[in-house]
Amino acid sequence: MTTTAPAPRDARPPRGPRPAAAPADSRAPARRRRFWAEVGWKYPVAALIIFYAVFPLVYVLSAAFNPRGSLAGSSALFSAVSVDNFAALGETRYWNWMINTLYIGGASAIGAVLMGAAAAYAFSRFRFTGRRASLTGLLIIQMFPQTVAFVAVFLLLLALGQVVPILGINSTVALICVYLGGALGANTFLMYGFFNSIPTEIDESAKIDGASHAQIFWRIIMPLVTPVLAVVALLAFIASFGDFILARIVLTSEENWTLAVGMYQWVSNQLTSRWGLFAAGAVLASIPVFVLFLSLQRYIVGGLTQGAVKG
Amino acid sequence: MTVQLDAPRTTAPIARRPLEPRRRGFGWGFIVKLALLALVNAVGITVILAAWRTEAWVILIASIVLLVIVDAVYLAKRALPLKYLLPGLSFLLIFQIFTLGYTGYVAFTNYGSGHAGSMEQAVEAALIQGEQRVEGAATYPLAIVQRGDELGFAIVDDGGVRVGSELEPLSEAGGASLDDDRPVDVPGWEVLPRAAVLSDPELQERVVNLRVAVSDDPEDGSIRTRDGTSGSIYSSTLSWDEQAMTISDSETGLVYAADDRGNFVAQDGSRLAAGWYVPVGFDNFVRAFTDTALAAPLFEVTLWTFAFAILTVLSSFGLGLLFAIIYNDPRVRARKLLRTLFILPYAFPAFMSALLWRGMLNSEFGVINDLFFFGADINWLGDPFLAKFAVLWVNLWLSFPYWFLVCTGALQALPGETLEAATIDGAGPWRRFRSIILPLLLVSTAPLAIASFAFNFNNFTIIYMLTGGGPAFPSSSSGLGSTDILISAIYQISGVAGGTADYGLASALSIIVFIVIGVISALAFRQTRKLEEYQ
């Protein structure tokens, strides 16, 4: 069959007698009934879903601005508004942890992007012995998360710290290295698919013009794959932002903690009294993640469905 | 699309450049490469030297091998792919593949509290623990000195000053000056004022634990201090006989012999606290299944781990898919806004969500009880059943937006003609969903569902942050609780966060988790292959 006009994909063909055939006065209620049966009910349902999805976020926002600062009495939403909690963050180590988190997340994101892009370039552009095998190997390794091996990570860093203190327990550099250990397994496939979508003719013509492989990689390929680089950077950043178990084990002294470790400590010990601080801290920390996430969500979903897990 | 449009533009300037002969080795790239290689070599050699000094042979060999490979790969003209793979590969080897292998090794040892190092270290620890103040020995006026991060003692002996640290025994310090019988200026060292020591608890502890050997001979004992102003000689009543592999206590006359379980045991059955780790075969695995204090809670934890992972995936996938189908309707207005609102929980960092819900579900002050249950005192996180329900509820909140996004994307990629043809053939909405939409959708989403299962199987953050694994099992000393999943149980048992450590048992359980994930992934991927063949 041929369609002449681009019809909406989901539009249903009219069933039964066309409404036009009915008398004019009964047309409006019938059409309204059909609207409610097919489309209208979706709005109240959406309101319910939005309530489930958004209520906790509205609540945390209200708690952040609630001057009482404790869990008790923070149920009445926006009953009083002040910025006391935000100001009080300055008296804690919050900003210290924030800087640590940004530093660790930023460094592991950049490292993950560089390593992943280089590996994806090699897999995509060179044909070498063991290529198939190493791709399969990576696929298998990425199934075994580092977090389950945290005991071994802990013992490894204990041993490394005896030799090189900067790679030992309580060093942020060591934590970044641990995160980078997972960079290849998690990201190569995401990038590999994207690299493959760039035609090799581009490389070839550059090669004929005398470009070296390094020039092709840095000057031609990297600018073309920027979207996937951004996505991998964001995913790596969010992964380290949200990691608790490794950060908790590696970073032992309070000034080295990340937000996840520090804010857990606040709330686990004195949940009810530190509530306002937690809420204010959560609101501040989530804003940049929200913004990045919402602006990049299209690419993230595309990446997830197209390349992430499949070989 | 954009890729192909942009591509010619980007290559144009390069293409127009005149052909150069291949003259590698003199451009900027080469200089950068040399500088980086020099840096890597400098760091590598520093590590090798440090490993040599601390006698860490495994690290020494590993770093030599790695450095040789790096130099070979980047200086030779061949092995082009390796130049791009090596940085990521070396991190992968050290911090992921090695740790996987090491987990396997530790699982077969009794590594943990009381068995924390080599035999040599255990002997040293035993001798230190056996140290006592020598009766009637003199006390020396003493000052705490510091050099960089290294602490030491300076004592006054016969009018002269002797200085030493943990790493080097006492030796004469020339040119030191005294004030009121106390060293005030020691060349090469910074004398810490007493107030600084008193005001810093961490420093105090280091000072109390500091031992400075009197001489190269361990029999001479070492200087220790209790108050930071005077030191006296401590020496061990224990002595180590390397030939017989025994430690004898001169005070009690007991002789402790090394056994094959990593302990020093005397004839009367008493043993020293310090031990070393030895391979114990399958003991840890056997213990996980047979130890009465452990086996029953672990069994329940395992069941709940599966239930948690499966229910989470099913519920969030189902809900996300349902919403995706409902709102993938061009007649619904403001779909973009709705979609953004739906996915907000996914963009909120997960650990904060768990902590947030922990507060909201608080039975006394929580907003859930206050607003939705009329102030009732429902103990969400304290009742085993409700706590499990709460975990699933919160995880559903966290993950349905992800599935909504994924399913919306997958739905929009479905071939419209197939659906249209089915409609013409008279298929109703349910039939179309079951026979066309779902099978096609599963091809692209099944691998994600497996990944999500594996992720939730090890979703430490939500469990630890929301319930901490609690409420604890009654009548069990294991410290585990009814919402603990395997990974949080392993965390609890391992003792890395403090308490009694049992790295061996924890690693054995990690191995079991790895096997479970591996088997499930393998089976599931085979199944998805089959699904793909339908396409």
Image: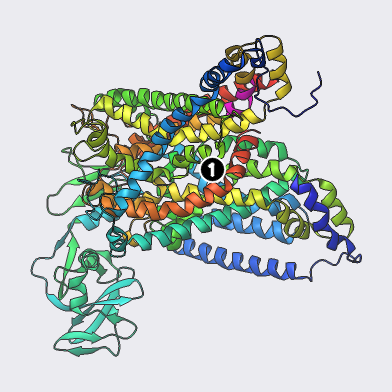
Query: What type of secondary structure mainly makes up the magenta span?
Result: helix
Q: Can you say whether B161 is above or below B369 in the image?
A: below
Residue at 13 percent across and 88 percent down: it is B180
Q: Nearer the viewer, residue A38 or B451?
A: A38
Residue B444 falls within the magenta-colored stretch:
yes
Specify whether residue B94 is in view: no
Callout 1: helix, strand or loop?
helix
Specify whether residue B193 is in view: yes
Residue at 14 percent across and 49 percent down: it is B253
Residue B524 place in picture, x, y as percent: 56, 23
Position of B306 compared to A177: left or right?
left
Find residue A22 and report its image quarter.
Answer: top right
- Tell me the magenta residue range: B440-447
Find residue A222 and report its image quarter.
Answer: bottom right
Report in which chain the residue with disc 1 lies: B
Q: Nearer the viewer, residue A244 or A147?
A: A244
Q: Which residue is mark 1?
A: B97
- Amino acid on which disc 1 is placed: Ile
